[in-house]
């Protein structure tokens, strides 16, 4: 079992295609791993054992019939509990959808199934993806496999923890302000936020519709690229979907190089609040890029300092609108429907019981920002800042091919440390938010351990919209250089559970 769960997704698929392993053997090994460690990690909210084994048996039957298998056929995956899965619970980490069985699959879920990827179950997350630590989940926090007393990032902490704990070689996350990249950084894994609109949001429960983006997560750059290629592409069911070819991400991951590339370093992505060890590993990464043949260009993007403030007006405003559908009348939890309460009272009681503190905080903030007399002062001003940030990215990408930065200002912090300090929690996304506001593509990959605490540090790579392949070209080159330095991908150093 140990040997199977330590394989990369690419290696696993190759062994299944050759007949060296069966898909059922691979699924059973990962299900056994989940059973052995997930009580401590709490990466999963629901494990679909029967569904996973049925998918695995179908892959083995295809191979027995001589059918050609896809590049990820039979490879297990952990799916963030924000994508609808027909007949399988989708809670979005909230009590308001506890026990809800969706009647349809999200487009992303359909594409995974069509590619014969084996979905093991649904992973824990901050409620409605609102958080940076997975502590706002209504079902309890997830632990970081590097240190179970530390957070695994958020909102997709369950997906990242499943990778780091070897419960799955692939995972899916969503990124509204950094919720793929930040968990990847603090768990020593790889996570990509694709260009906005390049992966369908149909069937993904909405938090902030102009920012939300599903994306791939894995333990290596190549595995992430293989998953990216499966889930990306135009979807007529999503009005924000881009009708454009998927960039050649797998080819880029197989041919990583930064020779002759111009790499930007933004002045605003360092300073007060950044952990010394994080900056040390980032500076070493910049030097490594130089050694690999990249030209480093200093950039000044002053509007980036306003990104956090703009984000926490735009995202709550959109969430206050999106979450209005959870009224206790159509689906999900219903409280107070005993014949003595009006429809308005039922809605109020349902929301009081179903929504957690962080969700209520953001709904109130968004409703206030959109209210008469405050719209222009708050939401309107935030959208102007968003335009400035987009323009600064465009100007920067006239000078450079990609931008690099630390993914997070600090390594994983203790569970509970920032629970009562929302502002401290929000600062975890300081480096990731500008990309969401502009809609660009970005990746986080491991760049070493911070000397103060021996916990993973993430390197963020940002590329222009629809140039996602640049992330993989640079990421693969950096990863290969790190492997040469350390002898093995960083994830191998994660403490055993």
Image (cartoon, rainbow, N blue to C red):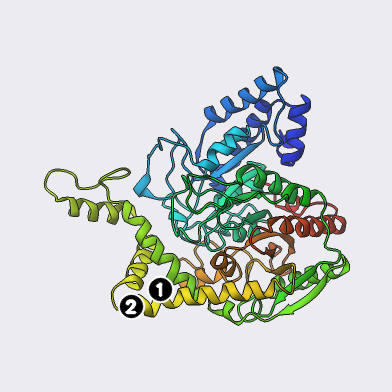
Q: What element does badge 1 sit on?
A: helix
Residue 40's disc is: none
Q: Is residue 243 visible?
A: yes
> Residue placed at 70% from the left, 38% from the top?
5
Q: Where is residue 47 in the image (x, y as percent from the top left)?
A: 52, 36
Q: Considering only vertical position in the picture, is 494 above or below 20?
A: below
Q: Where is residue 213 in the image (x, y as percent from the top left)?
A: 54, 55
Hey, which quadrant is residue 378 in on the image?
bottom left
Q: Considering only vertical position in the picture, is 104 above or below 61?
A: below
Q: Can residue 420 be seen in this view?
A: no
Q: Rounded to the nearest whole Å, what is the CA distance between mark 1 and mark 2? A: 8 Å
> Residue placed at 65% from the left, 61% from the top?
442
User: Which is nearer the eye, 44 or 373?
Assistant: 373
Precedes in sequence: disc 1 or disc 2 = 2
Hey, which quadrant is residue 26 in on the image?
top right
Residue 217 relative to residue 207: left or right: right
**Residue under circle 1?**
379
Q: What element does badge 2 sit on?
A: loop
**Residue at the top extreme, as displayed:** 65
Q: Where is residue 46 in the image (x, y as percent from the top left)?
A: 49, 39
Mark 2 Cα shell of 10 Å, populated few (<14), some (14-19), many (≥20)? few
**Residue under circle 2?**
374
Mark 1 Cα shell of 10 Å, populated few (<14), some (14-19), many (≥20)? many
Q: Position of residue 147 (x, y in %)?
A: 63, 56
**Residue at the front extreme, as displayed:** 243
Number of numbered discs present? 2
Q: Considering only vertical position in the picture, is 129 above or below 459?
A: above
**Placement of the N terminus among the 4 image quadrants:** top right
Q: Do the residues labelled 1 and 2 touch (CB within 8 Å)?
A: yes
């Amino acid at each position: 079992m140990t040997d199977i769960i330590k394989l990369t997704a690419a290696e696993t698929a190759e062994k299944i295609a050759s007949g060296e392993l069966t898909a059922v053997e691979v699924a059973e090994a990962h299900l056994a791993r989940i059973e052995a460690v997930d009580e401590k990690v709490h990466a999963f909210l629901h494990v679909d054992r029967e569904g996973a084994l049925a998918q695995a048996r179908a892959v083995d039957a295809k191979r027995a019939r001589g059918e050609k298998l896809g590049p990820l056929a039979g490879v297990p995956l952990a799916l963030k509990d924000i994508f609808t899965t027909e007949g399988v619970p989708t809670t979005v980490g909230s009590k308001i959808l506890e026990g809800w069985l969706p009647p349809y699959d999200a487009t992303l879920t359909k594409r995974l199934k069509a590619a014969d990827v084996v979905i093991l179950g649904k992973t824990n997350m901050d409620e409605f993806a609102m958080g940076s630590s997975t502590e706002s989940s209504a079902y309890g926090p997830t632990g970081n496999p590097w240190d179970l007393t530390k957070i695994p990032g958020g909102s997709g902490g369950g997906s990242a923890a499943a990778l780091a704990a070897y419960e799955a070689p692939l995972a899916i996350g969503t990124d509204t302000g950094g919720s793929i990249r930040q968990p990847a950084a603090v768990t020593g894994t790889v996570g990509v936020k694709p260009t906005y609109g390049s992966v369908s949001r149909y069937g993904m429960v909405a938090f902030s519709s102009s920012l939300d983006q599903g994306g791939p997560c894995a333990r290596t750059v190549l595995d992430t690229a293989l998953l990216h290629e499966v889930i990306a592409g135009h979807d007529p069911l999503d009005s924000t979907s881009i009708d454009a070819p998927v960039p050649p991400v797998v080819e880029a991951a197989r041919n990583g190089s930064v020779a002759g590339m111009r790499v930007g370093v933004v002045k605003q992505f360092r300073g007060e609040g950044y952990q010394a060890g994080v900056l040390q590993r980032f500076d070493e990464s910049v030097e490594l890029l130089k050694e690999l043949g990249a030209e480093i260009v200093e950039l000044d993007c002053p509007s980036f300092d306003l990104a956090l403030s703009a984000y926490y007006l735009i995202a709550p405003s959109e969430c206050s609108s999106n979450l209005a559908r959870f009224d206790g009348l159509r689906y999900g939890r219903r409280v107070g429907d005993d014949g003595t309460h009006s429809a308005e009272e039922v809605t109020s009681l349902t929301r009081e019981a179903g929504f957690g503190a962080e969700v209520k905080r953001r709904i109130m903030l968004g409703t206030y920002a959109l209210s008469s007399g405050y719209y222009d002062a708050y939401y309107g001003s935030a959208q102007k800042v968003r335009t400035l940030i987009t323009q600064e990215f465009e100007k920067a990408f006239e000078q450079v091919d990609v931008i690099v930065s630390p993914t997070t200002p600090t390594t994983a912090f203790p569970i509970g440390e920032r629970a009562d300090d929302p502002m401290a929690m929000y600062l975890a996304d300081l480096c990731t938010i500008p990309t969401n506001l502009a809609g660009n593509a970005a990746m986080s990959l491991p760049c070493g351990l911070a000397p103060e605490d021996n916990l993973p540090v993430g390197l963020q790579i940002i590329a222009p919209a629809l140039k996602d392949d640049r992330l993989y070209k640079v990421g693969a080159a950096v990863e290969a250089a790190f492997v040469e330095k350390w002898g093995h991908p960083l994830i191998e150093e994660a403490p055993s559970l």
